[in-house]
Image: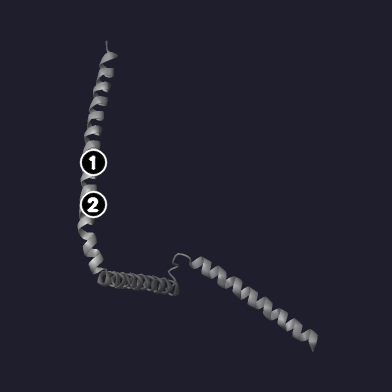
Amino acid sequence: MADQHPQQQSKSVQVVKAATAATAGGSLLVLSGLTLAGTVIALTIATPVMVIFSPVLVPAAITIFMIITGFLASGGFGVAALSVLSWIYKYVKGQHPVGADKIDCAKTKLARKAREMKEKAEQMASQTS
């Protein structure tokens, strides 16, 4: 008897879940249909207007796109420049920013190679004289 009560409760919960899902799904389906109908009506009305004004709208859209792209690129480059300057400032002040150890390692390797090349050049010069 005690086993039947949880089963009925789980069945009733399942029925409520199914009803909620069906209601939500149906509502979203109706909204989807209304959106599609509104889009078709708007396109039907707007298409002749777009065709008439396309010699003005297309260059205007291209110009607006280029202006927005330019402003976004300019802002991005500005942020990148400020980030780099901030990193350099921290590196020079000795605060050890992220990636500073790689720079130090590269500097050490470059100095070692330069020293090796200098020694080789001195050896070559002493052998030829």
Q: Is residue 115 left or right of residue 100?
A: right
Snapshot quadrant of residue 111: bottom right
Q: Which of 125 and 48 is in front in this view?
A: 48
* Residue at left offset 48%, top offset 68%: 100
> How busy is the neighbourhood of tag 1: few (under 14 within 10 Å), some, or many (20 plus)?
few
Residue tagged by mark 2? Answer: 40
* Residue at left offset 70%, top offset 79%: 119
Residue lying furthest bottom: 129
- Cα distance, mark 1 to mark 2? 18 Å
Q: Nearer the viewer, residue 72 or 119?
A: 72
Residue 3 marker: none
The reply to whether dot 1 and dot 2 touch (C-beta < 8 Å) is no
Q: Position of residue 36 (x, y in %)?
A: 24, 48
> How busy is the neighbourhood of tag 2: few (under 14 within 10 Å), some, or many (20 plus)?
few
Q: Name the secondary structure under disc 2.
A: helix
Snapshot quadrant of residue 122: bottom right
Q: Is residue 96 left or right of residue 20?
A: right
Residue tagged by mark 1? Answer: 28
Amino acid type of disc 2?
A: Val
Q: Position of residue 58 (x, y in %)?
A: 29, 69
Quadrant where the N terminus lies? Answer: top left
Q: Measured along the vertical axis of the image, is residue 20 above or below residue 100?
A: above
Q: Position of residue 13 (x, y in %)?
A: 25, 25
